[in-house]
Amino acid sequence: MTVAAPALQAPEAASAAQKLLRVSRLTKTYETPQGRIPVLRGVDLALARGESMALMGESGSGKSTLLHLVGGLDAADSGEIVIDGVEVTKLSDGGRAELRRETLAVVFQQFNLIPSLTIRANVAFQARLAGRFDAAWTDELIRRLGLEKLLERYPEQLSGGQQQRAAIGRALAVRPRLLLADEPTGNLDEATADEFMALALDVVAATGCGFLMVTHSERLAAKLQQRVRLSSGVIDAP
């Protein structure tokens, strides 16, 4: 009896299969009263499972736009985004919402906490929604982020830095497959910023998730495995 040998993947195909995130030829243009403004002009980016990357660049270079497209919060004009085998650029609004609930976690600059929920409920919200709530892990996050005395308060009763710590806890509680963060430390002191980085990298090491962070901080970027720079809507060559 002859057993057929398994098909071999080309090196490029095998490499692509190992990527958690692939962005190819991505473009985005915004309409303004002054005309069309191209923000992304053909971005290519790849992130493997268990890999961390800092996305850097000048203000207005398109960093937040790129993060929002990857997170399914906006639709690209053209190009492709694939996350864990799912082509985000072909999903409906409902499909992108499901992807954010089940696969992604995003730390925004604007916190986006739910005003009617306590901080305790806000931190647990996405993890409960995704059916991945872990009380012990959530308690550890609360302790490490210094939220113990704030749990029964509401977002409007907290400072900006405290709200950002709660938003970070919410994102990490779900243990996502891909963690996206848009200047997550902008409202934090240096010690708390370092604690967030330690927590995020703990999640990457423990779960093999990917971590893509927009930051202006060279100091924090140096803690991540890769650093890429967006300039004039494209990724600069290394």
Image: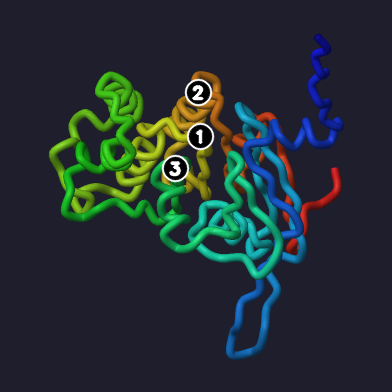
Residue at disc 3, secondary structure:
strand
Q: In the rendered image, which residue does mark 3 sit on?
A: 105
Q: Amino acid at mark 2?
A: Thr
**Image: 17 above or below 228:** above
Residue at disc 2, secondary structure:
helix
Q: Is residue 231 visible?
A: no
Residue 39 position in % (x across, y down): 68, 69
The Cα–Cα distance between marks 3 and 2, rounded to whole angstroms, is 14 Å
Residue placed most toward the observer, 238 or 7: 7
Discs 3/1, front: 1
Q: In the rendered image, which residue does mark 1 sit on?
A: 177
Dots 3 and 1: beta carbons under 8 Å?
Answer: no
Could you tell me which residue is drawn at 47 percent across and 55 percent down?
Answer: 96
Name which of mark 3 and mark 2 comes first in the sequence.
Answer: 3
Q: Amino acid at mark 3?
A: Ala
Q: Residues within 10 Å of mark 2 (few under 14, many from 20)?
A: some
Q: Residues within 10 Å of mark 1 (few under 14, many from 20)?
A: many
Residue 90 image-quadrant placement? bottom right
Could you tell me which residue is drawn at 57 percent across and 58 percent down?
Answer: 69
Residue placed most toward the observer, 190 or 71: 71
Q: In the rendered image, which residue does mark 2 sit on?
A: 207
* Quadrant occupied by the C terminus: top right
The answer to whether residue 218 is left or right of residue 1 is left
Residue 28 image-quadrant placement? bottom right
